[in-house]
Image (tube, rainbow, N blue to C red):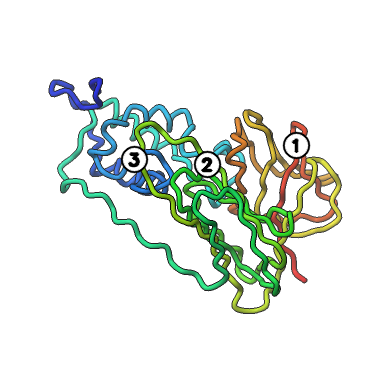
Amino acid sequence: MLSADGTVRAHDPITTQVTFDREIRAILASRCASCHIAGGSAPMPLTTYEEVRPWARAMKEQVLSRRMPKWHAARGFGAFLNDPSLTPLELGLIAAWVDGGLPKGSGAPSAPPARVAAARDDGDVLVVPAQASRETFDIRETQWITGWRFEPGDPLIASATFSVNARSIGTWVAGDRPVVFPAGAAMRVAGQVQVDLQRRPAADFERLFTPRSSVLRLTVASADPERRVWTERAACGAPRTRGGTLLAVRPILPSGASARVWLQRPGAPVTIVGWFRNVDARYLRSYWLARPIDLSPDVRVQADVPCEIQLTLAAYF
């Protein structure tokens, strides 16, 4: 049990074999450290035993209620490459560790991991000035890009949206890894690129941080692509005219809304895409399918509530 200042009382019994050094540290490193690290996008680091212990019960409550990590797709309804959510086993280990007295284990003293400088990908580097919420850039010569990496310069940046000529092409949400398209696929980029940033309020206990410029790195294809990637946005249930392979979906919903999304082809069983619950409009991310789905023109994207959805597709020329 934690005392008022977050420390463990000397008489608290240890009733679990789960320890920080053996199980919990690895879970936090794989699921949480992309944000919960010194200078990261979260209010507090969770990399060492000393950092985690004062927040242990709050951490347990947040993960068991699925409020953290930020992810609105229900487990078991679709599968996504960028899913950061904890497995039932990981949730059980965290609960057992917190309820069992927070044993540290017999490992070496905790040391925070060093922050590794982001790799400088070949391609266009678009710099967003510190404290700006929007920046636009002109790409005059057509580029074929195979993905992107976003590097926030401010821990308060919660999400970012990227668009080309007013058409959204992708998103970044705190903790997201770089986006890489399937082999042989690329997106045409030419004209005005716009980066829009959303910031969260600062917590009272956060350390002062001097913002630096944020960077969007567009990875340029090394050869002409075999398949073109594009995005399209339409009302759920609306007819479509183009076929392709569905790579990602981005439901456009107001905060607090939920939607079940599926694919409907005449005379065929439905294909479940995902169930997106209690969304936060500040985190309207793209959900990248673990298994892309062939989408013929007669397939409609349906939902159980009125909504719009952005699709990312690929097709051969």
Q: CA distance from mark 3 to mark 2?
A: 16 Å
Provide the secondary structure element on which disc 3 rests.
loop
Q: Which residue is disc 3 drawn over?
A: 207
Q: Is residue 197 above or below residue 71?
A: below
Which residue is more in the foreground, 209 or 118?
209
Image quarter for residue 60?
A: top left
Which sits earlier in the primary sequence, circle 1 or circle 2?
A: 2
Q: CA distance from mark 1 to mark 2?
A: 25 Å
Mark 3, other Cα within 10 Å: few <14 / some 14–19 / many ≥20: few
Provide the secondary structure element on which disc 2 rests.
strand
Q: Is residue 45 above or below residue 304?
A: below
- Give me the disc on residue 237: none
Give percent across and percent down for residue 70: 51, 39
Q: Do callouts 1 and 3 mark residues in contact (Cβ within 8 Å)? A: no
The mark lying in front, picked from 1 and 3, is 3
- Give me the disc on residue 199: 2
Which residue is more in the foreground, 203 or 99?
203
Q: Is residue 300 left or right of residue 58?
A: right
Which sits earlier in the primary sequence, circle 1 or circle 3?
A: 3
Q: CA distance from mark 1 to mark 3?
A: 39 Å
Say which amino acid is labelled 1.
Cys
Check the picture and name the quadrant holding the N terminus. top left
Q: Is residue 200 left or right of residue 143?
A: left
Image quarter for residue 138?
A: bottom right
Which residue is more in the foreground, 215 or 29?
215
Q: Which residue is disc 1 drawn over?
A: 307
